[in-house]
Image (cartoon, grey):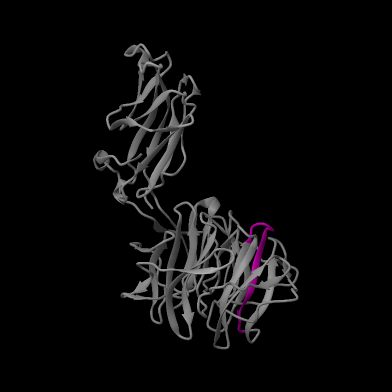
Amino acid sequence: MIRMLATLSLLGSVLSAQAAFTQLTPVLSPSPRAGAIGVSDGALLYHFGGKPSSTTELNDMWIFDGMNWTDVTPSTGVLPAPRDWYGASYDIGRGRYVLFGGRSTASGGNLGDTWEFDGTTWTQMSPLVSPSTRRWGAMAYDVATGVTILFGGENLGIYNNETWSWDGTTWTQLSPVTSPSIRGRGRLSYDLTRDEMIYFGGRSVGVALGDTWVWDGSNWSETVTANAPSTLGVVGRFAYGMTYDLLRDRHVLFGGTRNGPTLSDVWEFDGSNWEQRTVSGPLTRTGPTFAYVIGLQKTFLFGGYGGPQLGDTWEYQTTALPSAVPYGLGCAGPGGGLALASTSSPWAGDVWTATCSNLGPTSLAMEVWGLSQSLLPLNVVLSIAPVGCNLLNTADLLLGPSISIAGEATVQFALPNNPALAGAVIQLQIAELQFDPGGNWIGLYTSNGLTMTIGAR
């Protein structure tokens, strides 16, 4: 049974929240630049090269730990040629930053080389087969299959829709039954929850595209959405930043352009539809470094082109995080000590779930919801409650049965999709009523409590 409390609107929410940008002020930063691709190893953000002016590119490597930028460009050994608009990913399985192609003024055009960086040294790879020279290709690491995927790109005005994989030794051109049309200047974003990649829009022969595609590891499929990133009602976007926020389960798209001015709007994709967010902060720009760092649970933005090249650093995340924290102690019934635990995060708009284990074979699980924690020894008021079985909340919201199967009760609570509920707190406990064969109560046992704080994406 999925519950929704009508009284939830009366909880006295503390703020109206959603994800927002905050500008950071690191002591040291890369110089202003655009056209670089941000990737993460899960702990750090990696930023290579980019374009500081209309006639030059760079080949330095920087890492960001959430507070400070550090230049980790090797002082010895061979470095990749300076470039921008390359493809990049981080191969988590092998611990390597992977770089392919891009544009280099110093080299006279676009590139088709493959490099790897192990944190200390650059190594140019020499695969027997390789994608053709190109810029504007999109790359991401496929965690499920353990390879880096490259899609699309452009060279000498000719776009393609090729899909390639890199396993650390060999490039392999894949042959999906379905593919997006030819294009470049989009981004691939790997969805860790669904084990798939998202590619939005891009550009083809001067046209901004606005379709959404999913790569499942072997084939492409288009997802038709009710909304999509647009400008003045016209769908289409390229040269944006995009990444997947694991904490909030959203693909986040920032900025870019649609054959016109640079943009600064934010759109988020939840796996089925795009939603524009009301966000302020960074200036309009194309070609920013933009990546989510799992260990820091934040997305970071650096630089891009917004008239001049930019060199600012921002973080993006909600200020209203959800939590479900256990408190108090349960007591032992016929099936053992009752243990209540959260199995999902209580986001506004989601169904929050929790489970209580060790229920007896002939018992009824009752959900007890309250606004505040309390401590009432039940044996004082009910003789069937053993000493140590306590009511741990005020029970002023709801009492009701829960689903009980094979000694486990499942609680499902539909939270209204209202950001104004951010910060609202509710208490939950499970009470177990044990019956004899005649249907009479013979015991009342209680679990620990859970304090649920509602978060807003």
Q: Position of residue 217 (x, y in %)?
A: 58, 64
Q: Which residue in the rendered view is the most extreme toward the front?
A: 438
Given residues 133 and 220, the one toward you in this image is 220
Q: Position of residue 379 (x, y in %)?
A: 37, 13
**Residue 80 visible in image:** no
**Residue 331 visible in image:** yes
Given residues 111 and 178, the one toward you in this image is 178
Give the residues drawn in magenta, as a range.
Answer: 91-105
Q: Residue at x 40, y 78 (%)?
A: 258
Q: Residue at x 49, y 23 (%)?
A: 337
Q: Residue at x 64, y 87 (%)?
A: 108
Left or right of 115? Residue 32 is left
The quadrant in which the N terminus is found is: top left
Q: Position of residue 89 (x, y in %)?
A: 60, 65
Assess whether residue 394 is covered by the magenta stretch.
no
Assess whether residue 103 is covered by the magenta stretch.
yes
Given residues 440 and 184, the one toward you in this image is 440
Is 355 situated above or below 434? below
